[in-house]
Image (spheres, grey):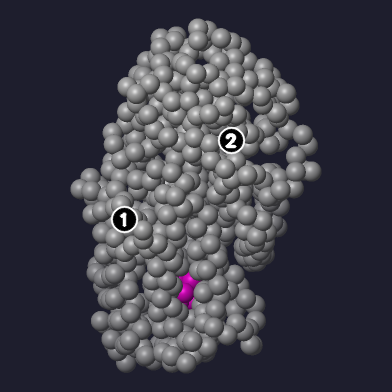
Amino acid sequence: MKKQLKEDAPQCELKSFSKNSGTQVSTMVLGPEQKIPDEDASGDHGDSASLGAINPAYSNSSIPQSPGAGSEDPFTTYFDEKIAIPEEEYSCFSFRKLWAFTGPGFLMSIAYLDPGNIESDLQSGAVAGFKLLWVLLLATIVGLLLQRLAARLGVVTGLHLAEVCHRQYPRVPRIILWLMVELAIIGSDMQEVIGSAIAINLLSVGRIPLWGGVLITIADTFVFLFLDKYGLRKLEAFFGFLITIMALTFGYEYVTVKPSQTQVLKGMFLPSCSGCRTPQIEQAVGIVGAVIMPHNMYLHSALVKSRQVDRANKQEVREANKYFFIESCIALFVSFIINVFVVSVFAEAFFGKTNEQVVAACTNSSSPHTHLFPDDNSTLAVDIYKGGVVLGCYFGPAALYIWAVGILAAGQSSTMTGTYSGQFVMEGFLNLKWSRFARVILTRSIAIIPTLLVAVFQDVEHLTGMNDFLNVLQSLQLPFALIPILTFTSLRPVMSEFANGLGWRIAGGILVLIICSINMYFVVVYVQDLGHVVLYVVAAVVSVAYLSFVFYLGWQCLIALGMSFLDCGHTNHHVFLKHAQDDLQGNLRSSGCKRWKARSLSASPLVSLVAKFSLQGCTGLPLFSHSLRGKNFETRWWSSGVRGNGSLQHGAAALQPLLTFLHVEPDTM
């Protein structure tokens, strides 16, 4: 029988579900208005206040979220406000709700439109014509599926990927993982700075040198990043404005060039590549590496936290997952169309062109950039800078300037989201709070210094050539986002009933394996082109360390996917549950207990989840006693609050995470 608290005690009902039966068990927990006390009388805080849980039951069983005060996320970055979701009964779909959820997906889609992607698009069109459009479509679909996992992780747990990694991996792997992700973010940031600097140089007709464009990019990033102080919706609207600029500018180029629609559709929906050789195959691999960005998984899982979702309400969680997925579909469809514009323009106008033909066209148009191209019969090679020049030679100065505006919008938008990614990653992995200003100074400095040196002492050829190295760097970092996201979304202790099913686990595992293999091929090709023995040796040494760490992450992932025979008897408990005890302590403090102190702990992996507490001041909290025998619990409900200092008395809310993990329901008598 269900026990009721006193009428004057704040209440809210939490429903938990049995793994096997699916029946509901209602337990009464304290209302959200009871906040965690600012100070512990015992003076022993530990990390329990900050160690929120990985399971929705961990973070919400004892503190159900509500739109009211007291629900502020302790890990906020730019979430000074959360968007409320309108209530609509008896509606399977609502445009009002979709609009409320719209925003995170479009910010996420910026990574699919950064200067690195634009350069990959134009090279794809110039090298292979329309033949690789189906690769772009397939890569975008795969990216959508992976972004779905990232969004679900953030919605279900209330934590983004970096925070979950902080709680689930031991210290050394966690630090290595953080460094790898930071490296990916810095590499992406360098690409974005390069794109913006080139765009500014083109718009100024060369009057502003490349190093000047780099410095301007630093300054305007600071300005744009403070737009969120005027409201989250205004910031999202600004990103939408930048995406609109890209759609209009690259759409203008598409209309001007007038590519064959038949060839566009054929290249998009008929997967083939007749006559393709090594350059075309390498370009196909480059498309996958450019589209699927490692830091974007961390970004998207954090952005979805900007909406008010009661994670204690499974229906609201399902609804949020649905609308975020719909929004992601729309956002990535828009980004795909923009990428198709770029590929098609260069496929129609410049596929098979020679340098001699381009020189003639630029000479006839009196272009000041004719010297960029050698006067020979070799195949035209283009990049972001030369692409704009060639467009200007063939279609007039307007095409060049409009191209530059589109590149500038791509660079500015992606550098802003990259800075947010860096802040989320640093805060999540290190549990470190930095101001946005300090974070931008750090990441900008690391990204700007090498870019600025190349811009000052070299020419545009070397600056755009850095993109090849940076694409390889991004490819190397991809496993450090894909493997963790698949691991944690497949773990029931993390995702509860929203964990990946068997089909998703198999498909996700295959996708991650294929993507990582493709990108490793891309890296091998790049290393082979270096042509120096010393570089080969360095690459071999780095490869051993790199592959060892990837193997470790893959091993943990396989266990999460269900291959428990790889566990060796300790991994699941030591790695994936190392913070469960802290979560129990944190939930006790969160339940209104003014004083708490761990009396004794056990070293056993399971028994260590159960601490002996001395509780004072916990009123109206239903408790139960238990005995632990392996994985079986015998529970007995107490009809009143705390009874003295019983050694094995716990708040129902505090032990709920443990019972949820073991899939055991308390007897309700």
Q: Residue at x 26, y 59 (%)?
A: 237
Q: Which mark is residue 67?
A: none
Judging from the image, what secondary structure is the residue with disc 1 in?
loop
Amino acid type at circle 1 is Glu
Observer-side mark, 2 or 1, equals 1
- Tell me the chief SS of the magenta region: helix
Q: CA distance from mark 2 to mark 1?
A: 30 Å
Q: Residue at x 63, y 34 (%)?
A: 664
Judging from the image, what secondary structure is the residue with disc 2 in?
helix
- Mark 1 neighbour density, 10 Å: few (under 14) some (14–19) many (20 or more): few
Q: Residue at x 45, y 36 (%)?
A: 14
On screen, residue 490 versus residue 215, left or right, reads: right
On screen, residue 657 versus residue 607, left or right, reads: left
Q: Is residue 229 magenta?
A: no
Amino acid type at circle 2 is Thr
* Residue 17 picture location, percent across and down: 56, 41
* Residue 298 picture location, percent across and down: 48, 49
Q: Is residue 59 above or below residue 280?
A: above
The answer, for residue 575, to whether it is visible in the render is no
Task: List the residue tagged with mark 1.
Answer: 88
Q: Which quadrant holds the C terminus?
A: top right
* Residue 562 picture location, percent across and down: 71, 48
Q: Which residues are magenta?
A: 118-123
Dots 2, 1 in contact, CB < 8 A: no
On the image, which quarter does residue 523 sit in? Answer: bottom right
Residue toward you, 441 or 27: 27
Q: Residue at x 37, y 29 (%)?
A: 11
Task: List the residue tagged with mark 2.
Answer: 660
